[in-house]
């Protein structure tokens, strides 16, 4: 296993068109679940200049104004109306109301073990969860910093009034003996608006003060004299967001998960209700991997869960510790199977996934694309707990 290497990860802000599509898709999921927690809904979104396309199929008692949910999400992002108007953009829809028998009001929280065995997955997927000891969040250092810079860009908009909601970040991190040691590079791609004469020197100065500085406050690994900092290396972007490039749900899966440092299934996490194993299986796998690392059983851990149509539980569970385990991988697997329940119904029950949109003001799922599906987010995510570490020890 290579120990000395350079690794880069990227992230985007909430106004990036791909990220906006994720937010819109999850805003629709929230609306359905807030009215009917047993809704089945899948929503996908694509957008370009002044046009939003929404496709949704659902079985639900809820009555949801899906275009209005999309407009509200766009409005909250805060594009200038001249670049993307929430009220005036064209919304094209394709909706399919599925038979109500596809929906069940059986509550996983009240089910017996036998009943949970009857809740089967309806799509096949191999999901991966990963955790490592590189950061307090037990996530790879590059994606943690890339996301932190993206969040700092969003937080800086009240101070940098010309800053667009659409920005991109990338960091290059040097590793020695498998551990992050220094920042090789930082790249910030920042859209701007309303200041056509703004030059690169002024933009760089503002970003160093309001973005880079706050992002590394209290961080041990910080930019040094040798760190290359690139700000809009191809020139100023006075047009950004959907006015400049298109977006689609599910195109930022790497930044949603582990920044490319570890495997993921490739399936979009957003736009799916909790009955979709290709979403919630990723959360269950992360939960297991994080508890393994928190328990001190490995410095790095990948959990693979393979599901097939018509089954209630994974047909395969695999554990990989990349040579960092303190006990055999097979022993870790046995402990996981003893203390974790990877059945679809149990995942929904244990994380209370149907009711989270009601419990959080303004919704739950719509906040994940912008704030993070893993690690630090807008609240403590149920699959980020390490409450089973003691059991695994």
Image: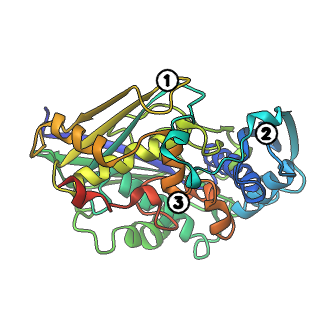
Taking the spot 22% from the left edge, 68% from the top edge, the residue there is 220
Quarter of the image for residue 100 reads top right
**Left or right, residue 104 beside residue 371:** right
Which of 40/49 is in front?
40
- Graded by Cα atoms within 10 Å as few (under 14), some (14 to 19) or many (20 or more), the crowding at tag 1 reads some
Residue 131 on image: x %, y %: 29, 48
Residue bearing the label numbered 2: 59
Q: Would you place residue 355 above or below residue 245 in this image?
A: below
Task: Count residues near mark 3 (Cα–Cα under 10 Å), then give few for <14, some for 14-19, many for 20+.
Answer: many
- Give the labeled residue for mark 3: 371
Residue 296 percent location from the top left of the image: 16, 55
Q: Identify the secondary structure beneath mark 1.
A: loop
**Against 102, is 367 above or below?**
below
Residue drawn at 53 percent across, 60 percent down: 371
Towards the viewer: 244 or 290: 290
Q: Earlier in the sequence, mark 2 or mark 1?
A: 2
Helix, strand or loop at label 3? It is: helix
Q: Decide if residue 381 is on the left or right side of residue 316.
A: right
In this rendering, the label closer to the viewer, 2 or 3: 2
Q: Residue at x 50, y 56 (%)?
A: 351
**Whole-Å distance between the Cαs marked 2 and 3?**
28 Å
Q: Residue at x 52, y 47 (%)?
A: 112
Disc 1 target residue:
308
């Amino acid at each position: 296993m290579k120990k000395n290497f350079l690794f880069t990860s990227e992230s985007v802000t909430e106004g990036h068109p791909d990220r906006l599509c994720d937010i819109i898709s999850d805003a629709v999921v929230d609306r359905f679940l807030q009215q009917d927690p047993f809704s089945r809904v899948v929503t996908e979104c694509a957008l370009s200049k002044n046009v939003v396309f929404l496709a949704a199929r659902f079985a639900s008692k809820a009555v949801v104004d899906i275009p209005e949910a999309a407009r509200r999400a766009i409005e909250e992002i805060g594009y200038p109306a001249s670049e993307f108007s929430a009220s005036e953009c064209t919304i094209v829809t394709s909706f399919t109301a599925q038979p109500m028998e596809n929906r069940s009001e059986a509550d996983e929280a009240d089910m017996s073990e036998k009943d949970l065995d009857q809740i089967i997955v309806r799509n096949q997927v191999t999901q991966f969860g990963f955790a490592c000891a590189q950061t307090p969040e037990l996530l790879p250092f590059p994606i943690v910093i890339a996301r932190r810079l993206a969040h700092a860009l969003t937080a800086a908009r009240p101070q940098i009034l010309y800053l667009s909601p659409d920005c991109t970040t990338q960091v290059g991190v040097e590793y020695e003996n498998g551990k992050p040691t220094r920042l090789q590079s930082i790249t910030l791609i920042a859209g701007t608006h309303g200041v056509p004469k703004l030059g690169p020197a002024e933009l760089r100065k503002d970003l160093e003060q309001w973005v880079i500085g706050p992002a590394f406050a209290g961080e041990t690994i910080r930019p040094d004299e040798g760190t290359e900092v690139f700000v809009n290396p191809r020139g100023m972007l006075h047009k950004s967001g959907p006015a400049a490039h298109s977006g689609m749900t599910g195109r930022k899966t790497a930044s949603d998960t582990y920044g490319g440092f570890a495997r993921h299934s490739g399936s979009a996490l957003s736009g799916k209700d909790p009955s979709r194993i290709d979403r919630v299986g990723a959360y269950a796998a992360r939960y297991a991997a994080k508890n393994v690392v928190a328990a001190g059983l490995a410095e790095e851990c990948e959990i693979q869960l393979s599901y097939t149509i018509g089954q209630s539980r994974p047909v395969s569970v695999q554990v990989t510790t990349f040579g960092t385990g303190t006990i055999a991988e097979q022993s870790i697997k046995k402990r996981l199977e003893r203390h974790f329940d990877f059945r679809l119904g149990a995942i929904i029950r244990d994380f209370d996934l149907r009711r989270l949109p009601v419990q959080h003001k303004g919704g739950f799922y719509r906040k994940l694309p912008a704030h993070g599906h893993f690690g630090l987010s807008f609240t403590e995510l149920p699959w980020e707990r390490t409450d089973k570490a003691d059991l695994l020890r």
